[in-house]
Amino acid sequence: MFNTKMSGLALALFTSLICCSLALKSPNESLPNIIIMLMDDMGWGDLGVFGQPSKETPNLDAMAAQGMLFPNFYTANPLCSPSRAALLTGRLPVRNGFYTTNAHARNAYTPQEIVGGISKDEILLPKLLKEKGYTSKLVGKWHLGHRPEHLPLNNGFDEWLGSPNCHFGPYNNIGRPNIPIYFNSEMVGRYYEDEFVIDGKTGESNITMMYLNESMEFILRQSKAHRPFFLYYAPDATHAPVYASKKFLGKSQRGVYGDAVMELDYSVGVILSWLKQLGIDQNTFVFFTSDNGAALYAAKEGGSNGPFLCGKETTFEGGMREPAIAWWPGQIEEGTVSISSHLRNELMAVRLGLYKAHYWTWSNSWQEFNSGINFCPGQEVINVTTHEQRDHTLQPLIFHLGKDPGEKYPIRVLSSEYRDALKSISPIVEQHQKTLVPGAPQLNMCDLAVMNWAPPGCDKIGKCLKGPQSAPWKCEWPH
């Protein structure tokens, strides 16, 4: 979705502006540290500050009270990989190549069999910050390609603990390998094995605590060395299959998903307290958000998008609008709210002010829907949440998000309100289409041979596996 409100692209650009403005600082002034906390499939309605009735996010709610809340913050894409690519490049997925041309306007991401990844032509945020003397670390999920040339340390990061893909599994390591966990440039284990176990029955796992401890150690080390740092904290516990440590299991009213949210909320509180304890809180910009809306099709393992329509993988509000909080003591005024506020290889929707125009609509395909996957359970809107793509380019569906945040009642086409809204939005669409230079699509080809059979470092820990012969094909994206 193209959006004129605050978006993940705006965050990347804002952070880049911090980076570029550093040249204006005097030699005696310290450079601000930057922490981006990116959750996985966490919805707008999962935070107490946005009205979640169980109020199980006290640390995030306090962060909002001490900083700035963004109720109109948008991701660049309603799916994990293209959203993350946009966040780190400051460019739309259609510009940075994180899209597919295999089928019209389909969602695409980076499963194990994907051949592509982040393009070598893209400049990521950590590379910009490195020029200013920053040390950058990723803790958590990468999801911008798992082949060696696409990994974090080859794209500007100095350190990494985490995984290149989602933690799907467990697999038998014969037909499909378990996802590796990396420490810097080499794997140190695999999900569902050894210390990286996720209990499929209970949801118990210590991985979030591992990520928290690694983040705290990095912050401490950089603080002691008086080096500016960029921490990209990207835990994935709220992505199905959801997990939480034993300390948090059974604590939430919302099941294991809620337990995972509570543990992530705890980790945010610990990190902010750590910054205060080290005396660097007033020199650290922290931003919290999510990669896309909650996955409603995950049922009990999915979150809440509050009053908004549908969720992950759709360009309705539930898929695109994310929880977001900025925190920087002494720089961001406490208790403030910013209400000022793109897509795939097709312009699907545009928001301008309180009006949102849909140029294409659908939820998910009949193929997926008939297999039991529903992106909009209990929220079907006639002629809007369809299971075939509807082309509205000649007469877009327009909603007033102030009066109708759930996108249930399109404005009448013959009304003056419709004509006025379309008159304002159309020039923005024309300008976008006129200036668009698409990147080469990176998510078109798949090959079982490129899966995580033998990642770097596997030989040192006896985790190398034998994969099949290369037989590439065009990836199929049913969603």
Image (cartoon, grey):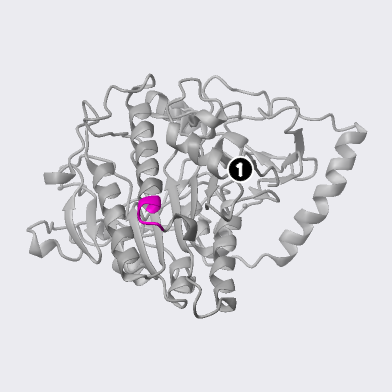
Up the image or down, 321 lies above or below 91; here it is above
Residue 244 placement (x, y as % from top left): 28, 34
Residue 383 is left or right of residue 75, and the answer is right
Q: Is residue 218 visible?
A: yes
- Residue that carries the numbered disc 1 in the rendered image: 70
| Residue at the image point whose x is 23% and y is 30% from the top | 247
| Residue at the image point whose x is 28% and y is 22% from the top | 250
Q: Please identify the quarter of the rendering in which residue 230 is found.
A: bottom left
Residue 352 placement (x, y as % from top left): 76, 46
Which region shows up in magenta?
275-279
Residue 426 is left or right of residue 35, and the answer is right
Q: Identify which residue, 70 or 178, lies in the foreground.
A: 70
| Residue at the image point whose x is 55% and y is 25% from the top | 51
| Residue at the image point whose x is 58% and y is 59% from the top | 92
Q: Is residue 238 visible?
A: no
**For the view shown, which residue lies furthest in the right direction?**
416
SS majority, magenta: helix
Residue 70 placement (x, y as % from top left): 61, 43
